[in-house]
Amino acid sequence: MRKVLPFLFLSAALFAAPARAAEKPSLLHGGSATPNFFGATGLLEIPSASVVGDRGIAGDAYFTGDFQSYGLLVGPFDRLEVGGTYLREDRGHGHDDDFLFDVKYQVVKENTVIPGVAVGLIDAFAQFRDEPSWYAVASKGFPKFLPVLGGLRLHAGFGGGIYNERPFAGLELGLGTPLDLIPFTHPKFSFIAEYVDEDVNVGLRGRWRGLAGTVALFNGDTIGGGISYTTGLRLW
């Protein structure tokens, strides 16, 4: 069953994509679709139900005490994102280099009432772990509810591989700053917390247009950080 599930997710993602999306690119200046440390759009380690967007593209570079990762994501069609991540893992006695192939399909788009739902694979060809990391995740945003805080986004899901066949959950809370008084475009900051494989990770993320910078503390003992850029790709 473990071997069959990842390929069911991959097949559903690829065959459910339309031949060509009629909509214009949905992400021309970034937004909430920021790659995580493993290359999929999401928080720190967990994915979200967002995708990079119809003809969107995102590049990222992340660094921790355990590994470095450099990734590229593309949205060839509406609801679908595919990408690759080069992962250089520090083993103490040397380095292991892996290339992770990621795919995510947004089964349900989020609206005012219902959450978004997505299924996907991280490391589809099991280069990093003994099996692909499959997952299903739901995400829901809530509007600004305090003057000093921004909107809140909640995420919950279940996955295998790096998620160890356990549930995971996370939140991203917008933070108000004195910059909010400026009537011009400026960076937006958010606090991130997630629970994954019995670990708790926290971080801060700042976004300005398509650029995002993230710092994180993994399970209280490993520091990480990195940058990403999300934009639109008008080539077809």
Image (spheres, grey):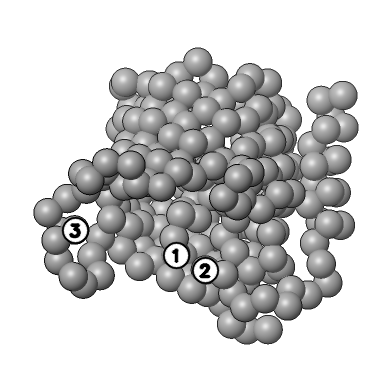
Q: Nearer the viewer, residue 61 or 19?
A: 19
Which residue is at 27% across, 41% downward?
146
Quadrant of residue 17 in the image? bottom right
The mark nearer the N terminus, 3 or 2, is 2
How far from the left and from the top, in percent, is residue 63? 37, 43
Which residue is at 62% across, 72% downward?
55
Taking the image as shown, residue 158 lies to the left or right of residue 187, namely: right
SS category of the residue bearing label 2: loop
Residue 100 at least partly seen: no
Q: Name the residue under label 3.
A: 180
Q: Do the residues labelled 2 and 1 touch (CB within 8 Å)?
A: yes
Circle 2 residues within 10 Å: few <14, some 14–19, many ≥20: many
Which residue is at 52% across, 74% downward?
232
Disc nearest the viewer among 3 and 2: 3
Residue 27, which numbered label? 2
The quadrant of the picture occupied by the N terminus is top right
Q: Do the residues labelled 3 and 1 touch (CB within 8 Å)?
A: no
Quadrant of residue 137 in the image? top right
> Type of residue at label 1?
Gly
SS category of the residue bearing label 3: helix
Outermost residue to the top: 198
181 over 50 or under it: above or below:
below
Q: Which of 223 and 92 is in front in this view?
A: 223
> Type of residue at label 2?
Leu
Residue 141 at least partly seen: yes
Which residue is at 36% across, 63% downward?
211
> Type of residue at label 3?
Asp
How far from the left and from the top, in percent, is residue 151? 37, 46
How far from the left and from the top, in percent, is residue 65? 35, 33
